[in-house]
Image: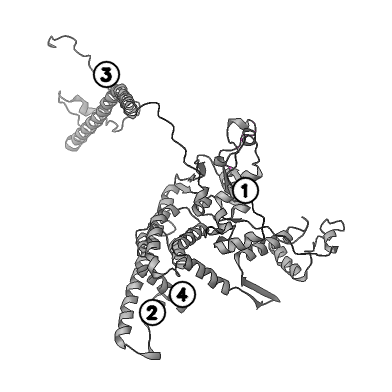
Amino acid sequence: MIECMFDEATPDALITEIEASQQQESALMAHRLAAIAALLSQRIAEAEDADPDPGYAMITGFARTTAEVSAAMNMSPMGANHLVSQAEALDTRLPNVAALLAEGRTDWRTVQLIIARTELVSSDLIGELDQSLAERIGRWQCWSRRRIINAVDAAVRDIDPNAAKERRVRADDDRHISITPQPDGMAQVRGTLAAAAGAAFNKRLSEMARSVCANDSRTIAQRRADALVALLEGRVLSCNCGEPDCPARAAETEPVTGAARTVINVIASQDTVTGESDQPGYLEGYGMIDAEQVRELADRAALRLVECPTVSPAEALRYQPSAALESWIRCRDVTCRFPGCDRPAAFCDVDHTVPFNHANPAAGGLTVPWNLACYCREHHRLKTFHGGLSGWRDEQLPDGTMIWTSPTGRIYRTTPGGPELFPQMRPACVEPKPRKRSRSRENATRIARARRKIRDQRPANVEQLRINRARKKEIADRKWRNHMRKMLVLFKGREPSTSPWCPWVNEPLEPEELPPDWQPPPPPPQQLDDEPPF
């Protein structure tokens, strides 16, 4: 039955069902969490009334609720504990966010991130943060998980910087590397590092994995694993192509001297770097870092001013953007601009929103900031090979906002991530152009044009109304005559009628549907004088 439920549904109807089910899921999740919160309140009251000083024998209301939820939902104790904690946070700390979830105006994924990222905010400030996030959630419809985390972290740092600092200190204290034996002679390496160290480590492994020749038989994942071993042994990654003239083989015999120089990108304001502001920075591909970390990295890094460059007419007609323009686009977008995608802009393609015209560049598709955006390879291919009227279409506004239209006609808006984190990256408002005509005159012209169109269309509408009424009357007359013919057969059999008043009753049944080209007789000519028609 379920397999046949949507057999006849159109893609538009299916997307509508998906959207509706997501809203229902959000409302159901809010309903469940509200019930858990109410149960928790009752169990806490029961535990406090049972014995005001139970000592070590006390079973708290939270423990009682966790046990009941674990049994009712067949969950592990850890999972039930986490769910009860989330319900309590929504009930006592984030009621405005909980109300949006109940109305289906946000999804459970977003709410989970908000609960996790705001757990250290003080009770005195959580109400302000709750109100601020509830007002901003409506703009997060097409945001990826990384962008939501960045926005919540930025809001926490604005309202309660101590909570953000405490989170970083706690995370830094929990850094570790663990090695777990695995079957088949393998081991699993897991760990947590500072974001800057992780970015440098990841980039170094990728550089070593790409240092071998194209004939190397290993996958990228296998090369990265072997690069870690080579890094530990202080040597370069060996190529396994087996060719004596391999260009990567010569480097194997060279000694490794000095530490490798790895490039990681951090976006921060000038005031943060100089210590005049505590505005957080953004570590490319990892997320927000606080001002202290930014300044630590800036002390030993090369600084480069990132601003929207002025594009000359010659550069606008060139397909490849300049290095300054490409850097600005990547910093402005932060991630892929497709709805929900969080792939870092550093690994994305810089694409022309209006395709570049190679035959005549001046005809359209200029290489300018408001016509460039970052798309990961998957979504770049989707736009290129599944575009047009029946596919995905994108439109870019001057401020970098992307308006996506899906194959079923849905509209999705994504805004660049950079201005959300650094408001100074937003383009300045352009002074409006003076109006050449007054608004009242434009309204009068528009109304006159609409009335003239209605007046010109009125004769055609009157004629079409006459035809529609005539067709309706003709069908009704035929049905009545066919009914009388059937009554004649019922009462007299095949004996014909001899009545001189309705000889048509002896004729065969008439079709009760009119052909599309059927036309009624023309209307009688109008009487031009006042003489009676007799």
Residue 79: image tag = 4
* Mark 2 / mark 4, whichever is N-terminal: 2
All told, the count of numbered labels is 4
- Name the residue beneath numbered marker 3: 522
Q: How far across and how far down the image is residue 503, in percent?
A: 19, 24
* Mark 3 / mark 1, whichever is N-terminal: 1
In the rendered view, does 255 fall on the left or right side of 3?
right
Label 3: how many residues lie within 10 Å, few (<14), some (14-19) or many (20+)?
A: few
* Whole-number angstrom distance, CA of label 3 to CA of label 2: 85 Å
* Whole-number angstrom distance, CA of label 3 to CA of label 1: 73 Å
Q: Nearer the viewer, mark 3 or mark 2?
A: 2
- What secondary structure is the magenta-colored segment mainly? loop
Q: Nearer the viewer, residue 36 or 60?
A: 60
Instruction: Note whether residue 494 is visible.
Output: no
* Whole-number angstrom distance, CA of label 1 to CA of label 2: 51 Å
Q: Secondary structure at mark 3?
A: loop
* Mark 3 / mark 4, whichever is N-terminal: 4
Which residue occupies 35% across, 29% down? 516
Tell me the quarter of the image containing the N terminus: bottom left
Task: Specify the segment rendered in magenta.
Answer: 352-359
Which residue occupies 65% across, 38% down? 319
Which residue occupies 60% across, 67% down? 194
Callout 2 amino acid:
Phe
Q: Nearer the viewer, residue 480 or 430?
A: 430
* Mark 3 / mark 2, whichever is N-terminal: 2
Q: How is the image coloured?
A: one colour
Tell me the quarter of the image containing the C terminus: top left
- Name the residue beneath numbered marker 2: 62
* Whole-number angstrom distance, CA of label 3 to CA of label 4: 80 Å
Residue 327: image tag = 1
* Mark 1 / mark 4, whichever is N-terminal: 4
